[in-house]
Amino acid sequence: MIDVRAAVRSQLIPIDSDNLILPNTAIAEVIYYQEPEPVSGGPAWLLGVLSWRDRSIPLVCFELASGQPQPAANPQVKIAVLNALGGNPELSFFAIVTQRLPQLSLIDETRIAAIEHEIEKTPLILSRVIINGEPAIIPNLDTLEAMLLDCKKAWLRRKRKGAA
């Protein structure tokens, strides 16, 4: 009998004091850090908008969005461009700051275990897990996408009022 295990190609995205774990298909590209264009009146976690492949995409600091302190400056910082999976045509891609290059990991049931923890104070964290002996966070990308869409609507309303 053949032992077949479902394995998911994933990426460990290093954030300040943790790693986010995302399926490989969620990541469109990892790029060098570039300074985003600020969004006037946006929340602190929305670092701004950057140009990627002739598109303007929002850049997010996951730590700030989830209520953690802003990470210290890091010369190894990169940007992970993510495919927005919510299906809303207003948001096809967004980006998060990563403290180093993400690491590819093949994850199956033998390499991942849930961590018992307190109830999360933020809806951005679905679960905390151990992957290959390292702690990681499974983020709630649906919630993050909804937060970005809310910001976009508010930003567009402000632009229209300013143009009137």
Image: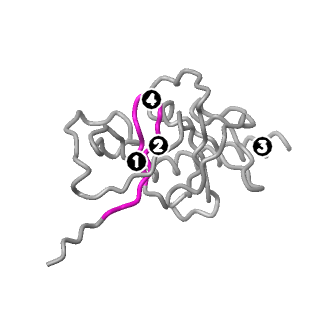
> Regarding mark 2 in the picture, which secondary structure is present there?
strand
Q: Earlier in the sequence, mark 1 or mark 2?
A: 2
Tags 3 and 1 touching, CB below 8 Å: no
Say which amino acid is labelled 3.
Answer: Lys
Residue at figure coordinates x 52%, y 24% from the top left: 71
> Which residue is identified by label 1?
21
Region in magenta = 7-22
**Viewer-proximal residue among 3 and 9:** 3
Instruction: Please give the label number shown on residue 13.
Output: 2
Q: x%, y% of residue 150?
A: 58, 47
Q: Earlier in the sequence, mark 3 or mark 2?
A: 2
Q: Quadrant of the C terminus?
A: top right
> Which residue is identified by label 4?
67
Residue at figure coordinates x 44%, y 34% from the top left: 66
Residue at figure coordinates x 47%, y 58% from the top left: 24
Q: What is the CA distance from the residue labelled 4 to the residue labelled 2?
A: 18 Å
Q: Earlier in the sequence, mark 3 or mark 1?
A: 1
Residue farthest to the bottom?
A: 1
Q: How is the image coloured?
A: one colour
> Which residue is identified by label 3?
159
Say which amino acid is labelled 4.
Answer: Gly
Q: What is the CA distance from the residue labelled 3 to the residue labelled 1?
A: 35 Å
Give the class, few, some or many, for how many residues have Cα within 10 Å of label 2's Cα (few <14, many ≥20).
Answer: many
Say which amino acid is labelled 2.
Answer: Ile
Give the class, few, some or many, for how many residues have Cα within 10 Å of label 1's Cα (few <14, many ≥20).
Answer: many
Tags 1 and 2 touching, CB below 8 Å: yes
Q: x%, y% of residue 105?
A: 39, 52
